[in-house]
Image (cartoon, rainbow, N blue to C red):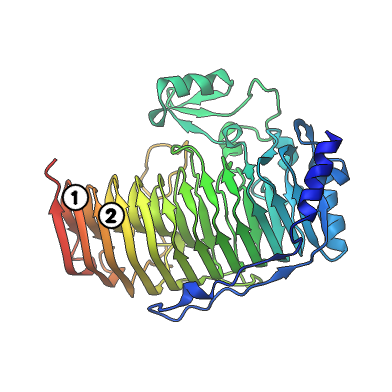
């Protein structure tokens, strides 16, 4: 085993140790709006291998302390690359520091422990468990390589009986757990594995699920080449970050994974998502913006380019919402394929969650086998997590943060197979959907060409060929 690690280390030394984000300027040519490009950044050439710190890739030895010590010590020396060779590296949550590159060689798997006690956040203000990989107010971080980061999400996620087969359901029940709502919902609670639960009820524990990779208020982030899978909740989820590059990653989890969002940019400026493949349980490529934070590095989503990506299963291929409070500006989405998603282009929000969109350009999108709408605008979205009881009469809501989907330009869409081509509904008395254009497209549908509430939503349909599927 030592010889194997030595050979892996020598192989690493034969390649360039320095990590440098590529030049992405070619992606910014001929854009319909000026988008501030991401900026290349470099990391130091210093390199170490995780086994030097006592980590063992046998899938049994808990490597949390070794991994964290490697990160802390290398960052203190100015930073560099930490290499994970072939193996299964079992760990609890880890925290990235400035100038650190986590690099996974081919057939390396970072596998997160099912022991929930490892993820408890000691902060009295914490509402959730610690993310599997986290970073807070650091600069120049990257996760690269050809390996896999596995969040072991089956230990965390509730499962709806209606979304799994009999065989799958029996497998969940065989793990232990508890059933709720007359057997229609399963929680990973009091599992036969024996790891302790960290809340008083399964419902409370479910609300504290964590993300797989969650940098907050960070600048200069590169995620390249690796596979993220089976997150407890979201997979790749930068918040209030600037200069974010996601290139050539794969995100995958079961299609029915509760809240299994793939790549979510929440309040990020200067970001690019390219050459990536998504097959996930919730939104695919999603833009979000929460309430304004005075001490945040940035607020709102601005200057974002998304192209040359493929989304298989997801609730939406490209999604805005459901929160867009601080607004969306200068976002370009083009040359993407959505195949088998629930919806194609999805814009969702509600009173209390809404903001304004400006300069959004979406073009050259190919869609096949879309289950519901190819393009949909929804302004009364209600987030109903697993375990929610029956809908009750709501108290009068303060009229703040009203959605305003505007200045959105969609063109050159080819969709073969959807139930509804274009659907939109605003809110009576408010100007929620206006100055939206769908042009120069072909949409093959099985149900309705369009379902637009013209009293609350104003969408210009220009030169769109709606074709009824005769099958």
Above or below residue 142? Residue 63 is above
Tell me: residue 279, above or below residue 303: above
Identify the residue at horizontal 57%, vertical 33% (top origin): 154
Q: Which residue is mark 1?
A: 445
Position above or below: 43 against 3: below
List the single residue furthest toward the bottom.
34
Q: How many marks?
A: 2
Q: Quadrant of the C terminus?
A: top left
Q: Decide if residue 46 is in sight here.
A: yes
Horizontally, is 467 left or right of 434 in the view? left
Q: Which residue is mark 2?
A: 374
Label 1: state its secondary structure: strand
Residue 460, given in percent of the width and then of the height, sits at 21, 71
Q: Quick check: 188 left or right of 34?
A: right
Q: Nearer the viewer, residue 88 or 213?
A: 88
User: Gap in Å between the C-alphas at discs 2 and 1?
Assistant: 9 Å
Mark 2–mark 1 CB contact (< 8 Å)? yes
Q: Earlier in the sequence, mark 2 or mark 1?
A: 2
Mark 2 lies on a secondary structure that is: strand
Residue 459 in the figure: left or right of residue 190: left
Residue 289 place in picture, x, y as percent: 50, 64
Place of residue 323 in the rendered image (x, y in percent of width and height, measured from the top left): 46, 60
Q: Residue 404, position in %: x, y?
A: 36, 70
- Circle 1 packing at 10 Å, graded few (<14), some (14-19), many (20+), is many
Q: Quadrant of the N terminus?
A: top right
**Which residue appears at 84% of the width and 51% of the height?**
70
Of residues 15 and 365, the one nearer the viewer is 15
Image quadrant assignment for residue 232: top right
Say which residue appears at 67% left-offset and 55% top-offset. Answer: 143
């Amino acid at each position: 085993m030592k010889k194997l690690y030595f050979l892996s280390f020598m192989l690493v030394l034969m390649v360039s140790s320095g990590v440098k984000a590529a030049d992405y300027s070619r992606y910014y040519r001929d854009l319909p709006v000026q988008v501030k490009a991401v900026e290349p950044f470099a990391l130091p050439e210093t390199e170490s291998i995780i086994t030097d710190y006592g980590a063992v890739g046998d899938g049994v030895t808990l490597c949390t302390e070794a991994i964290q010590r490697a990160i802390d010590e290398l960052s203190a020396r100015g930073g560099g690359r930490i290499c994970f060779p072939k193996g299964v590296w079992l760990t609890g949550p880890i925290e990235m520091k400035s100038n650190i590159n986590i690099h996974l060689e081919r057939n390396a798997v970072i596998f997160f422990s099912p022991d929930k006690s490892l993820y408890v956040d000691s902060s009295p203000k914490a509402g959730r468990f610690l993310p599997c990989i986290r970073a807070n107010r650091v600069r120049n971080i990257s996760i690269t390589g050809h390996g896999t980061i596995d969040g072991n999400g089956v230990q965390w996620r509730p499962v709806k009986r209606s979304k799994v087969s009999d065989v799958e359901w029996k497998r969940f029940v065989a793990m232990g757990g508890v059933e709720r709502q007359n057997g229609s919902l399963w929680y990973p609670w009091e599992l036969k594995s024996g790891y302790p639960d960290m809340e008083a009820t399964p419902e409370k524990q479910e609300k504290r699920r964590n993300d797989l990779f969650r940098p907050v208020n960070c600048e200069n982030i590169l995620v390249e080449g690796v596979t993220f899978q089976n997150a407890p909740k979201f997979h790749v989820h930068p918040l209030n970050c600037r200069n974010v590059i996601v290139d050539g990653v794969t995100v995958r989890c079961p299609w029915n994974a509760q809240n299994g969002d793939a790549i979510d940019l929440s309040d990020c400026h200067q970001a690019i998502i390219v050459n990536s493949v998504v097959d996930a349980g919730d939104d695919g490529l999603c833009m979000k913006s929460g309430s304004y934070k005075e001490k945040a590095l940035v607020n709102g989503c601005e200057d974002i380019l998304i192209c040359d990506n493929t989304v298989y299963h997801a609730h939406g291929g490209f999604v805005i919402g459901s929160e867009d409070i601080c607004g969306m500006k200068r976002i370009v989405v083009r040359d993407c394929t959505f195949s088998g998603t629930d919806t194609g282009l999805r814009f969702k929000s509600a009173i209390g969650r809404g903001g304004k969109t400006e300069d959004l350009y979406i073009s050259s999108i190919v869609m096949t086998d879309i289950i519901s709408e190819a393009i949909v605008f929804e302004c009364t979205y209600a987030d109903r997590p697993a375990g929610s009881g029956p809908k009750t009469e709501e108290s009068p809501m303060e009229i703040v943060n009203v959605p305003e989907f505007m200045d959105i330009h969609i063109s050159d869409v080819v969709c073969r197979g959807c139930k509804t081509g274009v659907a939109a509904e605003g809110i009576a008395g408010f100007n929620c959907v206006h100055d939206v254009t769908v042009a120069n497209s072909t949409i093959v549908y099985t149900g309705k060409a369009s379902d637009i509430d013209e009293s609350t939503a104003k969408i210009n349909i220009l030169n769109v060929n709606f074709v009824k599927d005769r099958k």
